[in-house]
Image (cartoon, grey):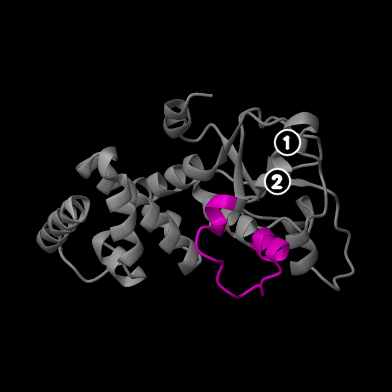
Amino acid sequence: MRYRDLLEARGRLLFHGTLADRVPDILSNGLKPMVGPLTQDWFKGKKFDKPALVFAADRRGLEKCVAVIAHQINLKLKIGRYDPLPPGAFENEGALLIIRDAKSFKRRPGEYEEVDDIHDHPRTVEPGDYYSADIVQIEDVLLGKRLMDFLARQYSIDSYFWEGIDEEIMNDIMRFRLTQQLLRACGKGDRKAVMAVMAELTPEEVRDLEGMGTAHSAQLRQKFTDLVARVRERALA
């Protein structure tokens, strides 16, 4: 699937978050229904039936996929559920699966949509969730740079994407996005200098340069211009 098609296919695709090391098996055998670790954790001790399902989200629910990926990375790296992920862990360990043929999926209505009868859906399905009891084939996979680039673009397109995103993951995505902007402004020949300058920026400075801090538009333009100059000075040193 062409990356441009993925970015433009609004409303026609579903997404599923997982770990990068599970991708080869999923591509060979499909995405199999299961009671995943997040479902087990959230509904631990509950006596009702927990059927094996494949969960997915549309673009408006991408933050759920990000949360699932983060939770699975926590388990893999044996990090506490509420502890921050190491820098780069999301990019290196996470995967976002793209599902085009979603005919087998059902959707529980989101909050404030139509009448939502919980008895029409398994109790492990939350409002807005897509789910299927069938093996699901994958259209494409986003890993590493493609994963981070796709999520960074959601920030520029959809402001609601950031609702519910963990701060550490948000910082990683914004740092990736700012790095790409600097590479475009300075040229790939200055990549080493760009990476050195980016390594010196605090999360607060990155947030400010990304427009998520206190600086206004004119200040942002000047700060970015100053950052480009800083990179070029480093490249000449």
Which sits in the foreground, 160 or 175? 175
Circle 2: residue type: Asp
Which sits in the foreground, 107 or 180? 180
Give percent across and percent down for residue 14.
Answer: 59, 38
Give percent across and percent down for residue 181.
Answer: 27, 46
Q: Is residue 201 magenta?
A: no
Is residue 9 in view? yes
Q: Which residue is mark 1?
A: 24
Which sits in the foreground, 92 or 191? 191
Q: Quadrant location of residue 213?
A: bottom left
- Dot 2 falls on a residue whose secondary structure is helix
Image disc number at residue 21? 2
User: As drawn, is 188 to the left or to the right of 25?
Assistant: left
* Circle 2/circle 1 CB separation < 8 Å: yes
Which residue reaches farthest front?
237
User: As drawn, is 161 to the left or to the right of 112?
Assistant: left
Give percent across and percent down for residue 113.
Answer: 55, 52
The N terminus: image quadrant: top right
The region drawn magenta spans: 71-92
Is residue 164 in view? no
